[in-house]
Amino acid sequence: MVTNIAEKIEDFLANDPKIPDDIIFRASQMFNNKLGKFNFKRKGGAKLPSMSQVGKPFCQLHAEKLGWEKVAEVNSFKIKMLYGDMTEVIAVALLLAAGIEIVDLNKRVTLETEHGIINGELDLIIKDGNSYSLWDIKSASKFAFERKFDSYESLKHNDDFGYLEQLYGYTKAEREETPDIKAGGWIAISKETGEMKVVPADPDDEESYTSKISDTISKYVEADETNFKRCFEDEPETFYRKTTGNRKLHKTCSYCNFRYSCWPNLVYAKNPRSKSATAYNYYTVFKD
């Protein structure tokens, strides 16, 4: 199925592509719904992490449960989210125009665990003949498109956002209604070049990742003020292969909304030894 999807997209884009009016109308309705989310406030108070959260580093989930103070969202955050939504609408329109049969979109699903229900919203289900597969659409920076979405193995080894748990969790949850469904993979779109890439998942990995979800939820239920543990430690800064005496956050931690709560003395500063205007880091130990 993966080859079929990739070939249909490639053939469509290579042959004077045109999107039929009925698909344009459907896409416009989808975007209207997505745009309406701009006015919604996210609700908190869920007992368990959502499907899109459960694969993240556990210290982030633990900090969220403890109610630690987050880094304030920048004013443009909602616009950034809209770009992702718009990318999804474009991808769906192109898939439909390429003759790919989408049988479900943005469907809410629930995954049962021994500690309660995990909620989520899958992106799309594709039918090819008598086979059904579940896919996630991801907009990606040029770096992520080339490195993270280079292959399934690359994604497995660079999955700080929990994309694998998310996809396999959705698939297991959907199997209640679609018994033969399999994890399809990811359809990635470069935000900078517009390129599309199909990255197939390995359905044989589903059990491993859904077991990880169960383990995470069990750990989450037991998480409290007494057992918080960082998943990553800070690391020495080097400049031209020599240590500077400074220490900086692990790369994963630099994107965490709880970085200042987790590291109270954190300093965001430019590397004083570098001439680059963009050589800024989050320092746990900083010496001028």
Image (cartoon, rainbow, N blue to C red):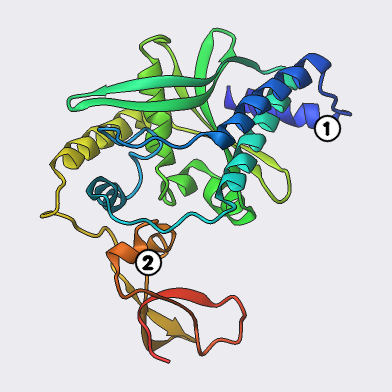
Q: What amino acid does circle 1 point to?
A: Ala
Q: What amino acid does circle 2 point to?
A: His
Residue 181, quarter of the rendered image: top left
Name the residue tied to disc 1: 14
User: Disc 2 versus disc 1: distance between alpha carbons?
Assistant: 42 Å
Mark 2 or mark 1, whichever is nearer to me = 2
Screen quadrant of the N terminus: top right
The picture places residue 250, in percent across and down from the top left corner, at: 37, 66
The picture places residue 236, in percent across and down from the top left corner, at: 35, 79
Name the residue tied to disc 2: 250
- In this picture, is 259 found above or below 77? below
Instruction: Say which of 230 and 258 sits in front.
Output: 258
Screen quadrant of the C terminus: bottom left
Tell me the SS state at disc 2.
loop
Q: Residues within 10 Å of mark 1 (few under 14, many from 20)?
A: few
Tell me what residue is drawn at x 40 percent, y 59 percent. Answer: 252
Q: Residues within 10 Å of mark 2 (few under 14, many from 20)?
A: some
**How many marks are shown on the rendered structure?**
2
For residue 190, say whether it is visible: yes
Q: Residue furthest left?
A: 226
Tell me what residue is drawn at x 73 percent, y 27 percent. Answer: 94
The picture places residue 246, in percent across and down from the top left corner, at: 37, 84
Q: Left or right: where does residue 223 sit relative to residue 99?
A: left
| Among the two numbered marks 2 and 1 on one chain, the one whose residue lies closer to the N terminus | 1
